[in-house]
Image (tube, grey):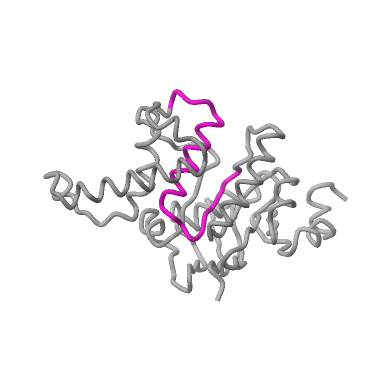
């Protein structure tokens, strides 16, 4: 059984088919890419997988369990975390506080125990902080813990968002254009980081326009065009696929 199974997923916005009948699998331990031109439906696909939109048709299964239509926090608690194409940080909170938000998806304390600051709630908060610090240390951003997220550079903010996703210890991590705005050296560092994340036992699904990053890090690549899947294979096969070449280079 694959870790993630997507079966006939579709989403329409009025008369526009953003995603239409898309099916693919992501095996546990793999790094899989999703590519396609602008407007191909890649970010909508991620929204459907992570619960930020509900599909019109189709199913999404994580470890064989249906997750389509669930709320984002429920899906995160089941082991799927994501980053966003457009950063979604709490700018007035510290870096540590932002990363701790990601870990709260695995907390079990109720509102009352937290409000009353009961011993169990305090212990849990310390565990959440420790997990957040561990994720930050993994990414080398621990020195930023007390900084306001809104005061950081774009690249640093991307690191904070990734640390927040990793703090939840996901089985499946969705990265939405993580190389956007990065230079060549930073992109090379990102490729190595994806390898380290995989080495921790985390499966990765990545939407990206940087073909060197996709072809150098992914085991398989799904290609979307106008919301439909036109290829799903190893990078070397996808590069030679005539339909893919036509989409990117024209007739």
Does 68 sit above or below residue 97? below
The quadrant in which the N terminus is found is bottom right
Residue at horizontal 44%, vertical 35%? 142
Q: Position of residue 155 (x, y in %)?
A: 56, 31
What is the tally of numbered marks visible in this picture?
0
The part of the image, by quadrant, that contains residue 144 is top left
Does 214 sit above or below residue 137? below
Residue extending farthest right: 251
Q: Position of residue 132 (x, y in %)?
A: 39, 44
Q: Does the magenta stretch include residue 155?
A: yes
Left or right of 222? Residue 107 is left
Residue extending farthest top: 151
Closer to us: 16 or 221:
221
Closer to us: 130 or 51:
130
Residue at horizontal 48%, vertical 67%? 62
Residue at horizontal 63%, vertical 39%? 179
Q: Does the magenta stretch include residue 169?
A: yes
Left or right of 187? Residue 5 is left
Q: Position of residue 63 (x, y in %)?
A: 48, 71
Residue at horizontal 61%, vertical 49%? 194
Closer to us: 30 or 208:
30
Does 106 sit above or below residue 144? below
Residue extending farthest bottom: 1
Q: Where is residue 82 in the image (x, y as percent from the top left)?
A: 49, 50
Q: Magenta region: which residues?
A: 150-177
């Amino acid at each position: 059984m694959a870790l993630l199974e997507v079966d006939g997923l579709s989403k329409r916005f009025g008369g526009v088919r953003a995603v239409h009948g898309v099916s693919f699998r992501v095996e546990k331990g793999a790094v899989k890419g999703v590519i396609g031109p602008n407007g191909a439906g890649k970010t909508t696909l991620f929204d459907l997988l992570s619960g930020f939109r509900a599909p019109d048709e189709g199913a999404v299964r994580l470890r064989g369990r249906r997750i389509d239509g669930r709320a984002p926090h429920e899906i995160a608690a089941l082991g799927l975390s994501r980053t966003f194409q457009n950063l979604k940080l709490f700018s007035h909170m510290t870096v540590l506080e932002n990363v701790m938000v990601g870990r709260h998806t695995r907390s079990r304390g109720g509102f009352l125990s937290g409000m009353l600051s009961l011993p169990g709630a305090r212990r849990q908060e310390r565990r959440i902080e420790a997990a957040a610090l561990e994720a930050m240390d993994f990414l080398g951003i621990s020195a930023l813990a007390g900084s306001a997220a809104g005061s950081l550079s774009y690249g640093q903010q991307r690191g904070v968002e990734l640390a927040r996703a990793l703090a939840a210890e996901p089985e499946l991590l969705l990265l939405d254009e993580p190389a956007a705005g990065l230079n060549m050296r930073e992109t090379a560092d990102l490729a190595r980081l994806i390898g380290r994340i995989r080495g921790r036992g985390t499966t990765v699904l990545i939407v990206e326009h940087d073909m060197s990053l996709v072809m150098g890090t992914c085991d398989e690549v799904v290609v979307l065009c106008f919301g439909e899947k036109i290829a799903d294979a190893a990078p070397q096969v996808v590069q030679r696929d005539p339909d893919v070449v036509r989409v990117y280079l024209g007739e």
